[in-house]
């Protein structure tokens, strides 16, 4: 069983739901309290043992690249003023670790993942959707990697949602269950309300075998006229072990304005430095 050393971050989206904020700033650089969304996801990957970060970017994403680079002027200024560099030193990646690949056309999540094929090579890999902020200890991907070492094959995130919300997500059709692990017998993309095979949705975390890249190579466009990762994953079911792993933690959909605000409030009140002030303010509303 090969280890999970590489992770793909599809970050080429335009973030139109957050305009005008995202006109000049990548949506992944929007902050939850004082840390960009993308940094939360990268830290989750590193905690899980990921060694190489692969960003699939598009035009206008230079701020994201700069964030994980050395900032000589900032560091020199902070040193001169006697300030700690701990907060920004932790952002740096090892030389050669971050790799940037362009998705030149917005052809869907499956296409974005496929754009990283040359760097992924013949290894299993993780996929992170940074819009999905997962808060848990250990992090979601660490939980998934531990599960992967037990069952191998493909392991995708799973999260229980209300039956009334299953028509909004990709849903797992479940087989045998073993604690937080659920055998996946099929994947259903946004089933009609009342027809979902379970209430387990896929919240933007995946561990996939490299064969999915060969499927994506020739895959036709699916829902929304895009190349869907879900369609490619569905072809692996029955040919390789395929499980869902239910997250032990809290999910915030930061691709949605309400979810983004909720994440800011939840993480702010949990902090020792600003939590009391934020709680006091909320009580006055």
Image (spheres, rainbow, N blue to C red):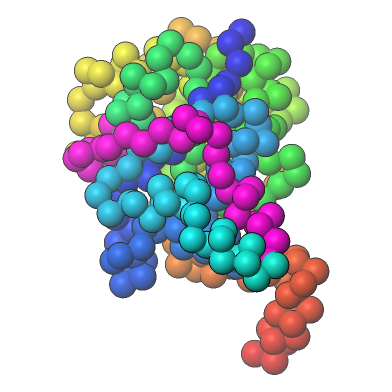
Q: In the image, is residue 249 part of the stretch drawn in magenta?
A: no
Image coordinates of residue 83 in percent, x first then y, are 69, 66
Q: Residue at x 75, y 66 (%)?
A: 270
Looking at the rendered image, the quarter that the C terminus falls into is bottom right
Q: Is residue 75 left or right of residue 178?
A: left
Image coordinates of residue 24 in percent, x first then y, are 30, 65
Image coordinates of residue 235 in percent, x first then y, are 38, 16
Up/down of 100 relative to 77, above or below: above
Give the residues drawn in magenta, as a range.
Answer: 83-111
Q: Is residue 245 visible?
A: no
Q: Residue at x 67, y 36 (%)?
A: 47
Query: What is the quadrant of residue 108 in the picture?
Result: top left
Looking at the rendered image, the quarter that the N terminus falls into is top right
Using the image as rendered, state which of residue 164 and residue 101 is in the foreground: 101
Direction bottom: furthest residue: 284
Up/down of 197 relative to 40, above or below: above
Q: In the image, is residue 96 part of the stretch drawn in magenta?
A: yes
Q: Residue at x 63, y 67 (%)?
A: 80
Query: What is the quadrant of residue 117 in the picture?
Result: top left
Image label count: 0
Using the image as rendered, state which of residue 52 and residue 150 is in the foreground: 52
Q: Residue at x 34, y 19 (%)?
A: 118
Q: Is residue 136 visible?
A: yes
């Amino acid at each position: 069983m090969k280890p999970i050393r590489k992770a793909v971050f599809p970050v080429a989206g335009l973030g139109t739901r957050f305009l005008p904020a995202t006109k000049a700033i990548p949506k992944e650089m929007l902050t939850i309290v004082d840390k960009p969304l993308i940094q939360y996801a990268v830290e989750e990957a590193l905690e899980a043992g990921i060694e190489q970060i692969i960003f699939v970017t598009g035009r206008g994403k230079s701020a994201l690249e700069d964030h994980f680079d050395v900032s000589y002027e900032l560091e020199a200024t902070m040193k001169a003023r006697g300030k700690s560099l701990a907060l920004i030193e932790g952002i740096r990646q090892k030389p050669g670790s971050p790799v940037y690949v362009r998705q030149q056309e917005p052809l869907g999540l499956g296409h974005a993942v496929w754009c990283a094929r040359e760097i992924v090579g013949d290894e299993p890999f993780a996929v992170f959707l940074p819009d999905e902020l997962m808060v848990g200890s250990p992090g979601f991907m660490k939980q998934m990697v531990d599960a992967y070492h037990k069952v191998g094959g493909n392991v995708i995130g799973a999260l229980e949602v209300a039956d009334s919300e299953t028509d909004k997500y990709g849903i797992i059709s479940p087989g045998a269950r073993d604690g937080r692990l659920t055998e996946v017998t099929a994947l259903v993309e946004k089933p009609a309300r009342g027809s979902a095979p379970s209430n387990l949705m896929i919240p933007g975390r995946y561990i996939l075998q490299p064969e999915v890249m060969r499927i994506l190579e020739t895959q036709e466009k699916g829902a929304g006229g895009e190349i869907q990762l879900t369609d490619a994953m569905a072809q692996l079911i029955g040919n390789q072990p395929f499980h869902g792993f239910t997250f032990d933690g809290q999910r915030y959909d930061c691709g949605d304005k309400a979810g983004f605000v909720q994440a800011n409030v939840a993480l702010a009140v949990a902090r020792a430095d600003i939590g009391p002030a934020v709680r006091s303010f909320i009580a006055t509303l």
